[in-house]
Image (cartoon, rainbow, N blue to C red):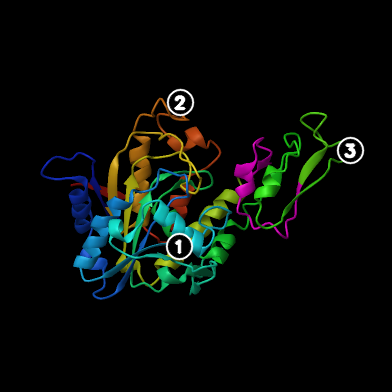
Amino acid sequence: MTSQVFFIDLRTNMDKNLLVKIRELAEAAGIGKIVKKRGLTAIKIHFGERGNTAFIRPVLTRPVVDAVRDAGGNPFLTDANTLYVGTRGNGVDHLHTAVLNGFGYSVVGAPVIIADGIEGRDEVTVPVGLKLCKEAYVSSAVARADSLISLAHFKLHEAAGFGGAIKNIGMGSASRRGKMAQHSEVAPAVISEKCIGCGTCRDQCAHGAITLVKRPAGVAAPHPKAVKVVKIDPKKCVGCAGCIHACPEGALGIDWEKDLPRFMERMVEYTVGTMKGKEERTLCINFLTQISPACDCYPFADAPIVADIGLLASKDPVAIDQASIDLVNAQPPLASSCIKGSRHARKDKVKAVYPKIDWQYQLDYAEQVGLGSKAYELIKL
């Protein structure tokens, strides 16, 4: 079955600015039909880590908020707390970061609510009954809302290949326990010949899973002064993979062939759980702007890999993500980006940045479990 995906470019003029075009996009995609009269509408968005600059500009959410209210709904912007250590790890810090990044009521026109509460424990257990997840732990504000709108900044991602509607809904809406469940097998392995024993990974680990121990005899070392090596306690490790990104030497790695496909499967199954009961009351909008090579969870944003493209909207999270990656891959890479010189740069932007990630598997599995269709009709407004 072919799903409709609506598209607007970023061209504007005196008669029609971008805010007007976003409103038209939302209306064309059926926002009026997914909003329940006098019902609560969760607008799921990533507020951006403090220091990141690639997240969706707050002012661009206002047309969606206004469209929900005009349709008779009661909108609020929301996101759930993070598993890793950062500026969004609890409800207070998260809300503070959202406000500092511009998501104030005077700008967005709606309340900002942290979906899983102060400690990330406010959740609803949703039966899923799929291969890996029999149930999903969904943040309560999203689970209890009558309607769901995903506003996703489309970008590449170091574990999923890319982050769009599926990741924004499935991973982003999960409570802390739900995020742990999805990351549970993304466990780091120590590459001892690269480890210098600096302790950077240990210092960032919020779960006390990492220690430095004396390097055993016969274990390779990068240089004679590297007398210690990292040891990871699998009983304490939650699989958040924060240490992998923190290591300056690239001494922690992932079993790409085993771990990441199951990670993607869990993320997809959580998307199914998050949308359960709201399948006909969910709308996805992807912003193909400032398409960065990594997640907005970092406290920085590297140069975009391609030029800004536009916005997509669809009721089908699989179709909109497939259309998004197709549009990104059709663009020439920016010379100023990190993918300059890669043999994959022209046809596959994910492979150019993350050559070991089979990003298509995310969409294949999503289609397999009935989340949506990879076949789409692109309707340009």
Measured Cα–Cα span from mark 1 to mark 2: 34 Å
Measured Cα–Cα span from mark 3 to mark 2: 41 Å
Magenta span of residues: 231-253
35 drawn magenta: no
* Residue 188 appears anywhere in the view: no
344 w.r.t. 175: above or below: above
Q: Earlier in the sequence, mark 1 or mark 2?
A: 1
Q: Earlier in the sequence, mark 3 or mark 2?
A: 3
Picture disc at residue 217: 3
**Mark 1 = which residue?**
173
The amino acid on which the numbered mark 2 sits, given as a three-letter code, is: Lys
Main secondary structure type of the part rendered in magenta: loop
| Viewer-side residue, 40 vs 257 | 40
The amino acid on which the numbered mark 1 sits, given as a three-letter code, is: Ser
What's the residue at 39%, 29% (across, down)?
A: 333
Q: Secondary structure at mark 2?
A: loop
Q: Locate residue 215, reporting x and y percent.
A: 84, 40
**Mark 2 = which residue?**
340
